[in-house]
Image: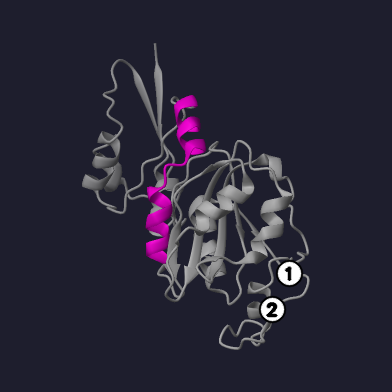
C-alpha cells in the first residue's frame, strides 16, 4: 500500500519569515469586549485579539467621557459624581454583541476606577447571559491592582466560568500581554484539541538550512516505511518562495 506524505514547507517558511503565528482551528469563537477611557485598555484588547484571532467589541457610552469628565481629582467631575451616586447608570450605544451565543470565550477589559472595574461595564454585564462561557477579565491602571474587580463582575454576572484576571500598566508591553494570553488554560481550545486529535499539525522553523529542514521532518516523529510518495510544494523560480534543491535534498 502506498502512503502519501506531504510536507507543506512553503507555507511554513513564508509564515516563519514573516513572523506569523500559528493558531489552532476549531477552538470555538473568542470575543474581546472592552471599554477604554484613554486608549490603554484598547491597546491591550488589540493584542489579545491578534493573539487569539478573536473579534473585538468596544463598549461605547451614549454620552462619551471627556478629559474633564475623567478628572478624578475634581470632586465635581462626572466620574466623581457618578462614583458617589449608587443609582448611576451609563447608557451604551450597544450592550449586546452581535452573535453573542456563538462565543465560547469572552475577554472583558476595563480601566480600574476606585479599585473596581469601570461602571461603564455594568450595562453590558446586566444585558448578557454568561452561561457556558469562559470569561477572562483584564484591566489597565497606572497604579491600582486588579483587586476584587474580576470577582465583583463575576458576582454581578451570576453565570459563566470566570478565570483569574490580569492587570496591566497603562503602557503595557505587547510581549507581556501576548505571554499572558499564551499561558491561559482556555477550555474551548483544550476541548477542541481533544476532539480533533487527528487534526493536522503544522511545524514552523526559522532555520532555513538543510539541517533545519531535517529537524522539521524529525519533529513529526514518524518513520516512513514501504512505498512512500513525497510531495514538496516549493513554487518555481523566480517565485519568492522557491526552495533551493540543496535545502531539501536530505529530506527527499
Q: Residues within 10 Å of mark 1 (few under 14, many from 20)?
A: some
Q: CA distance from mark 1 to mark 2?
A: 8 Å
Look at mark 2 in the image and give the residue it sits on: 65
Q: Residues within 10 Å of mark 2 (few under 14, many from 20)?
A: some
Q: Position of residue 39 (x, y in %)?
A: 57, 74
Look at mark 1 in the image and give the residue it sits on: 61
Do residues under tags 1 and 2 come within 8 Å of each other at their CB atoms? yes
Q: Position of residue 1 (x, y in %)?
A: 39, 11
43 lies left or right of 69: left
- Which of the 4 quarters of the picture holds residue 248? top left
Q: Please report the residue visible at 47 percent of the width from the left and 29 percent of the height from the top.
A: 199
Q: Secondary structure at mark 2?
A: loop
The answer to if 175 sits in the magenta stretch is yes
Q: Indicate whether 181 appears above or below 64.
A: above
Q: Please report the residue visible at 56 percent of the width from the left and 61 percent of the height from the top.
A: 109
Residue 11 visible in the current orientation: yes
Q: Which mark is residue 119?
A: none
Q: Please report the residue visible at 44 percent of the width from the left and 55 percent of the height from the top.
A: 20
- Which of the 4 quarters of the picture holds residue 145? bottom left
Q: Indicate whether 69 appears above or below 56.
A: below
Q: Please report the residue visible at 67 percent of the width from the left and 87 percent of the height from the top.
A: 76
Q: Position of residue 190 (x, y in %)?
A: 45, 34
Q: Magenta stretch?
A: 174-195
| Residue projecting furthest to the left | 211
Magenta segment main secondary structure: helix
The answer to if 142 sits in the magenta stretch is no
- Quadrant of the image containing the C terminus: top left
73 and 200: which one is in front? 73
- Which of the 4 quarters of the picture holds residue 46? bottom right
115 and 10: which one is in front? 115
Q: Secondary structure at mark 1?
A: loop
Residue 242 visible in the current orientation: no
Amino acid at each position: 500500500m502506498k502512503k502519501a506524505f506531504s510536507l507543506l514547507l512553503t507555507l511554513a517558511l513564508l509564515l516563519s519569515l514573516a513572523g506569523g503565528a500559528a493558531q489552532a482551528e476549531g477552538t470555538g469563537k473568542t470575543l474581546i469586549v472592552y471599554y477604554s477611557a484613554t486608549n490603554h485598555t484598547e491597546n491591550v484588547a488589540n493584542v489579545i485579539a491578534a493573539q487569539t484571532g478573536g473579534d473585538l467589541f468596544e463598549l461605547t457610552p451614549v454620552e462619551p467621557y471627556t478629559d474633564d469628565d475623567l478628572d478624578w481629582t475634581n470632586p465635581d467631575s462626572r466620574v466623581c459624581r457618578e462614583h458617589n451616586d449608587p443609582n448611576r447608570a451609563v447608557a451604551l450605544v450597544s450592550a449586546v454583541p452581535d452573535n453573542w451565543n456563538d462565543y465560547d470565550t469572552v475577554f472583558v477589559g476595563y480601566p480600574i476606577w476606585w479599585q473596581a472595574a469601570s461602571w461603564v461595564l455594568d450595562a453590558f454585564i446586566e444585558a448578557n447571559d454568561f452561561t457556558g462561557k469562559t470569561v477572562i477579565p483584564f484591566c489597565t491602571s497606572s497604579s491600582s491592582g486588579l483587586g476584587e474587580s474580576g470577582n465583583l463582575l463575576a458576582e454581578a454576572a451570576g453565570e459563566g466560568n470566570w478565570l483569574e484576571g490580569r492587570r496591566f500598566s497603562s503602557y503595557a508591553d505587547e510581549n507581556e500581554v501576548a505571554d499572558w494570553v499564551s499561558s491561559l488554560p482556555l477550555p474551548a481550545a483544550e476541548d477542541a484539541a481533544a476532539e480533533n486529535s487527528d487534526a493536522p499539525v503544522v511545524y514552523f522553523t526559522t532555520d532555513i538550512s538543510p539541517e533545519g529542514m531535517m529537524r522539521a521532518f524529525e519533529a513529526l516523529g514518524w518513520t516512513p516505511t514501504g512505498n512512500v510518495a513525497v510531495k514538496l510544494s516549493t513554487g518555481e523560480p523566480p517565485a519568492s518562495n522557491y526552495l533551493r534543491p540543496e535545502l531539501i535534498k536530505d529530506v527527499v
